[in-house]
Image (cartoon, rainbow, N blue to C red):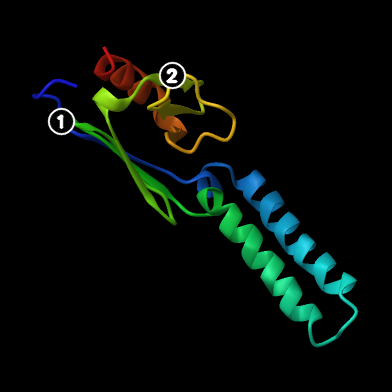
Amino acid sequence: MSQAAPPYEWTAHPLREHPAKAVLAALLVLGCGVLVGLVVDDPTVGPLAAGGAILFLLMTLNRFFLPSRYRMDEHGIAVRYPLRTRTLRWSEIKQFRHDQEGGYVSPRLRAGVFDTAGISLLFGPHATDIIPRINEALK
């Protein structure tokens, strides 16, 4: 990005952007917790197991249930996920894969399915602003 370009910031919060999916996800998480509680025979351990299952699923799905904050500036792109922060400089990014919903920037030319070196992007309603900015910064 050029020195004159101001930073671009956005927040993605799928829970708010997709209310029908949010209700379905919440019901599935609670349903799985209830099932775990019912499967465990011990009445003192069952509720703990159910709560643990619900907590595990909520932590696993944290990027759906909680907002992620993104920032692009002349140095690179950074994201504050609910449970961690990641930053990549533009000079480090070797590939940018995307569609209209989101994308992935990676410092590797060939990223595999389980690649964690890059940054997963959720565009929300900002795709038309974000995609050209990233493409321009990577030139």
Residue under label 2: 109
Spatial CA distance of label 2 from label 1 is: 28 Å
Please name whichever residue, 129 or 52, is drawn nearer the observer in this view of the structure: 52
Residue 127 point in image, percent of width and height: 41, 25
Q: Is residue 72 left or right of residue 57?
A: left
Amino acid residing under circle 1: Pro
Within the image, what quadrant is residue 18 found in? top right
Instruction: Identify the image quadrant of the N terminus.
Output: top left
Question: Residue placed at 63% from the left, 50% from the top?
Answer: 22
SS of the residue under disc 1: loop
Crowding around mark 2 (Cα neighbors within 10 Å: few <14, some 14 to 19, many 20+) is few
Residue 65 point in image, percent of width and height: 54, 54
Residue 104 point in image, percent of width and height: 46, 28
Amino acid residing under circle 2: Leu
Instruction: Identify the image quadrant of the C terminus.
Output: top left
Q: Is residue 5 above or below residue 13?
A: above
Question: Which of the two discs, 2 and 1, sits closer to the camera?
Answer: 2
Question: Residue placed at 41% from the left, 19% from the top?
Answer: 95
Residue under label 1: 6
Q: Residue furthest bottom?
A: 44
